Image (cartoon, helix red, strand yellow):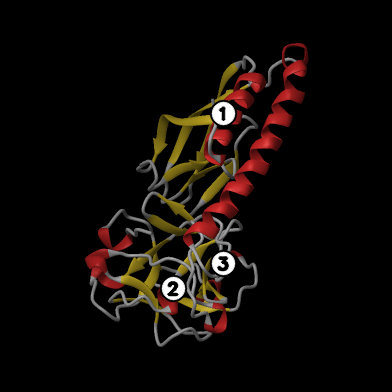
Amino acid sequence: MKVFSTPSNWVCGLTAVAMTLGAAPARAAEQTMELRSGGGYESTRLPKGTTEVELEQQLSGACRFNRSWGYDLSKMELWVNSGCAARFKVMTSGESSESSSGSNTGAAVAAVAAIAGLALIASHASKDRDQSNNNYYPDDNYPQRPYPDRPGGGGWGNQIRGMNNLCLDIEGGLRQGNQLIVFRCAGGNNQRFSFTRNGEVRVGNMCLDVDGGSQNDGARVLAWQCNGGQNQRWMRSGNQIRSQMNGKCLDIRDGNARPGQQVLMWRCNGGQNQRWWW
């Protein structure tokens, strides 16, 4: 009798083994941190092992989760914005002792290695079954999707929809310096965006860029050659797309969601013209 008949079943089975062998009791701990925004974006590093953050006491401003404060466990970062100042309770899980975990570590590592190998095999098998071409771009956060037409490095990515079901769009096509607008969704390469691990939002072979690194409300957003600058780094917070440079949000100008309307940088306020779906 076959216990595991498919690669996915093997992965599930070995994951359970790894979790069982690698598990060890952890010591939970709490500590408090204070962080203040003087009106702009401020952040601080979270302690190693942080599992959750709660607002313990608001000190000044309006502190609203995912609007004027939040945290990112992938970056181990706590942030505040728009004048929020508060004391936060930080929950961490301690490391288990060597004596209780040492014997489990080798088995867990071996199982995880087996999972990685089988997952790779399953991934290739799935692609062979479902696709007959190799036109994939290795997007960091989305399933790989084929688009045969790839002029200028485009032909991959996902539409980002906003108010009135309009799509983010590089006005006039994928040329450096063209501005970000919303337009009727048409599926063109200038409407396909990809988030990368280092915070870029790529469109074709270019990046979304806050024009001139401006900190002002109303700063334009352009397609520009990727250069790793802070004005080309973004983060997703709920349905908002924020600049890592200053915490401001992509915003449909004047809340007037019509084809051709500019998308600018503005202080995050939770409005519908600052909400996006991908």
Q: Which mark is residue 13?
A: 1
Q: Residue at x 56, y 40 (%)?
A: 7
* Precedes in sequence: disc 2 or disc 1: 1
Give how far across and how far down residue 42 sits, in percent.
Answer: 53, 49
Give how far across and how far down residue 220 sits, in percent.
Answer: 44, 76
Q: Which amino acid type is shown beneath numbered disc 2?
A: Ala
The correct choice, above or below, for 131 with respect to 73 in the image is: below
Is residue 46 or residue 8 the one in the foreground? Answer: 8
Residue at disc 3, secondary structure: loop
The N terminus sits in image quarter = top right
Label 2 sits on residue: 219
Comparing marks 3 and 1, which lies closer to the viewer? 1
Q: Residue at x 41, y 51 (%)?
A: 82
* Precedes in sequence: disc 3 or disc 1: 1
The correct choice, above or below, for 25 with respect to 271 in the image is: above
Label 3 sits on residue: 137
The C terminus sits in image quarter = bottom left
